[in-house]
Amino acid sequence: MSSKNKKVSDLCENPEDQEKEIHEILLNNKDFIAVIISVNFLDDCLSSLLKSIFIESSVSERLLKPQGILGNFSNKTDLCYALKIINKATYNDLRKFGEIRNKFAHRSLELSFESTEIKQLCSQLSIIESYNHQPGIAPFLESLLTNNPKNQFVISMVMIRRNLVTLSKSLLS
C-alpha cells in the first residue's frame, strides 16, 4: 500500500515500522502540510489513547467525534493531562504543536519553519532534551537539529507519537 493510501490511524499502530516513512512524508512536503499532517497524527494517537481507557460504547465514540466534546486536539490533550495519562512535559509539547498548527492554519502562505515565530516555538519543544542525555544519541540529534526547525518539529512529533502509542498499548494490557 502506498503512503498516500494509508489512513492516519494505520500510521499510529506500529510507530517503529512507519517512522522512516512518516519522516520522509513530512520532510518532503510544504511546511504547512507537514504541520497539519503531524498534528493530525498526534490527534489520532490521543484518540487511540483515550479509547484504550474508555468503555466500548456509543457514548465514547460520540465524545471523540469531531463535533463531540473531545473532538478537538486541545481538549484531548487537556483531558490526557488532567487524568495523569501524560506528563507535564508531553502536555506542554502537545500544546506547542497545537499552537504551531493554529499559526499555520491562519497564515499558511506567510509562514514557514524559517519564520521567527515558528523557529521560536519549535525551539521550545522539550522532548528532544530528554533524549539528549542518552549515550550516543545527543551528537546524532544535534547534527540533525542544528539550525533546522523543521527537523526539530518532525523529530519531536515522531518521538511524542511513539510515546503515545507505547502508552496506549500499555494501558490496553
Image: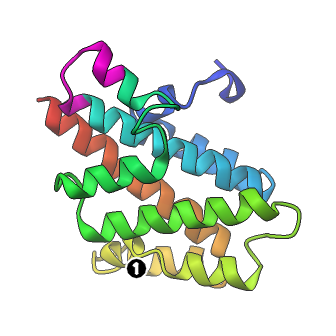
Residue at x 66% of width, y 29% of height: 3
Q: Give the range drawn in magenta.
A: 52-61
- Mark 1 — residue? 138
Label 1 Cα neighbours within 10 Å, binned few <14 / some 14-19 / many ≥20:
some
Q: Where is residue 138 in the image (x, y as percent from the top left)?
A: 40, 79
- Circle 1: element type: helix
Query: The N terminus is located in which quarter?
Result: top right
**Residue 64 seen from this side:** yes
- In this picture, is 113 found above or below 85? below
At x 69% / y 66%, what residue is drawn? 103
**Does residue 18 appear to the left or right of 170 in the view shown?**
right
Residue 36 in the image: x percent, y percent?
Answer: 66, 49
Q: Tell me if residue 148 can be seen.
A: no
26 vs 122: above or below: above
Q: Is residue 53 magenta?
A: yes
The foreground one among 59 and 158 is: 59
What residue is drawn where x is 41% and y is 73%?
128
